[in-house]
Amino acid sequence: MPSPASLWFGGDYNPDQWPEPVWDEDMRLMRQAGVTLATVGVFSWSLLEPEEDRYTFDWLDRVLDLLHANGISACLATPTASPPPWFTLAHPDALPVTADGVRLTHGSRDTYDVCAPAYREASLRITRALAERYAHHPALALWHVHNEYGTHTYGEHAARAFRTWLRGRYGSLATLNDAWTTAFWGQRYSDWEQIHPPRATQYLPNPAHLLDFRRFLSDAMRGHYCAQRDILRAANPDVPVTTNFAFGSWVPVDPWRWAADLDLVAVDVYPDATGEAAAHQHAFAADLARSWGGGRPWLLMEQATGYLGARVRPKAPGEIIRHSLSHVARGSRGAMFFQWRASVGGAEQWHPAMLPHTGADSPVFAEVCELGALLGRLAEVQDTRVVEDAAVVWDPESWWALQSPSLPSPDLDYLAAVRQVHRVLWRQGRTVAFVSPHSPMPDLPLLVVPLLYLTSAATARFLADYAEQGGILVVTYGSGTADEHARVWPGGYPGALRDLLGVRALQHYPLDPSVDAVTVCGEDGEYWGRARRWSEELDVADAKVVARYADGPFAGRAAVTRVGRGAGQAWYVSCDLEDAGLGKVLSRAGLSGGTATPPAVEVVHRDSRDEQWVFVLNHGNGPVTGADLGLAVESREVLSGVSGAALVVPAGGVAVLRGPRRP
Ligand code: GAL
């Protein structure tokens, strides 16, 4: 996909919520802010098709023409995330059903059953109508299918589709019964029709059943996406197609399995923290988005300009710019927001926007304009590559498996564990590539595998190959425990990875975070930190002890180990060490490179054959200089023209330097 002439900057634009005279003001202010892309029509189905097969496109024609006349491109959505009330009344079976058997009703959005034939048919009808009318509109730059796929449904349509999916996966009931361990509690299936979605049941559900249903739903939604994508592509193969992944404390679909079907990965990012933690969450999501697409350019499709209850914490002045640049630095084709103009009514009337209720004379709009001007100078960064220096395995299936009620501890928090590893590397100035456990590991010097609860034999082989070939592998607690069907690997933990790591845990010893903590010290007695949720009684086979438990039930026993494997090494961290201790492990793992950055300063490098770009985001309270960061003397800051040597980035500020590539 060729790079657009400028970075994409803008947001969801809902002119359908406003009288037409407001549209002219929108255009004037968008131009003032430097907006280059507006996302239109995301929830406009009831307005575009007020009754079955009757369309009212005139208003959308005017919107697209107006955008084009003002030099702004359109990211045109298919509105299938919000079926009209007439549709759900005509097809009540197309409404989602919860696990408790409650059929939801319209009145909000996302009231669809992705498996319902009527919904599928209606989705394709509106998609076809949009494709026929707009596929060659000069404003059209990007198709945006649906919005944040993720509505679960447990009704009869889902049951039928689930059975078909299971037949495809297992072939025979005997194989399924074995994979799901249905011998337990006498749950053997003797006919496919006996299998339901994991609806509310009397006591604990089967973890393998839960896990496969999540896999199935992700595939079912992907099928819905692909059917629309095919229509849009056929109408004009030159316009890229995407959908926006939701990402936060939940992961409704498996982006590894979707990414190849998207021309451009797009992601919505709403951190639930403030300050440095929010900056880190942006960097974390951005590294994931780039990695899902295998390093291809991607797009930050949505973020907020400010406060939204518990979901998005307030932003301090300067954070709109810093957070956006963190994404651009990490490969986003721009920075988009939800939404352009704040709504006065409706469910999201208090959602922050680029143009707040207050109007254009607001600090938020001023910062938005500043961001637009800055992005306007960065178009050429699109042709450079993000420099990565460490890899982390990220696995939505392990995350789903760890949401089952049948676990060795209720305190195993997958997202927290992966975020922690990323945070420690981020603070060490490293840029992380995430990798799927289902493919060979990348050629990067360090690979961290946090809490990979599900580890298939194939994944264990990929990890062993990585170490054999010279990589430094660091595996953390809880990994290797179960296979792809959530069945425990017998013989001692960490199951599938025991031989590779040269250790064998005789027992897990979960800690109660409200009362317990165990101390870990290096072999020289140096204090490394504490663990509060998890520890293990570890026997060492051929590994070397690097750190030990200093107190608690396993005082004196190994806590962290290392073993040479081929040309590389394999480390094991048997407890949930806090950041400082994990930092020691990762720096002692012998990794060189990275940028030694002052605290709270984020530095990302991008390069091309001849050039290097350096993004410096100062999230801290004091200034940072080019000398502090070892910046090349001959590089120049893009806006100010100041040299790398003379650069001073004030507290809260940003700088983007461009210079010749260093050998
Ligand atoms: C996203 C969604 C938007 C808007 C936004 C609010 O999840 O795609 O439509 O609701 O959240 O933060």
Image (cartoon, grey):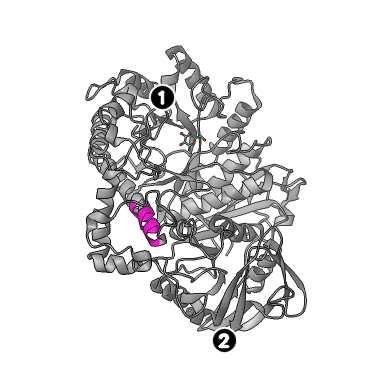
Q: Is mark 1 within 8 Å of ligand 1?
A: no
Please provide the residue range marked out in magenta. Answer: 208-216
Q: Is residue 618 visible?
A: no
Residue at (43%, 27%) from the top-left corner?
71
Dot 1 amino acid type: Leu
Q: Position of residue 129 (x, y in %)?
A: 24, 29
Q: Position of residue 480 (x, y in %)?
A: 49, 71
Q: Residues within 10 Å of mark 2 (few under 14, many from 20)?
A: few
Whole-Å distance between the Cαs marked 2 and 1? 67 Å
Above or below for 56 versus 239: above
Q: What label sits on residue 541 in the rendered view?
A: 2
In reply to whether residue 209 is colored magenta, the answer given is yes
Type of secondary structure dominating the magenta stretch: helix
Q: Position of residue 593 (x, y in %)?
A: 62, 67
Name the residue at the bottom extreme. Answer: 542
In the rendered image, the quadrant that contains the C terminus is bottom right
Residue at (65%, 35%) from the top-left corner?
314
Which residue lies under the disc numbered 1? 67
In reply to whether residue 127 is colored magenta, the answer given is no
Left or right: residue 610 compared with residue 209: right
Q: Residues within 10 Å of mark 1 (few under 14, many from 20)?
A: many
Q: Is residue 256 visible?
A: yes
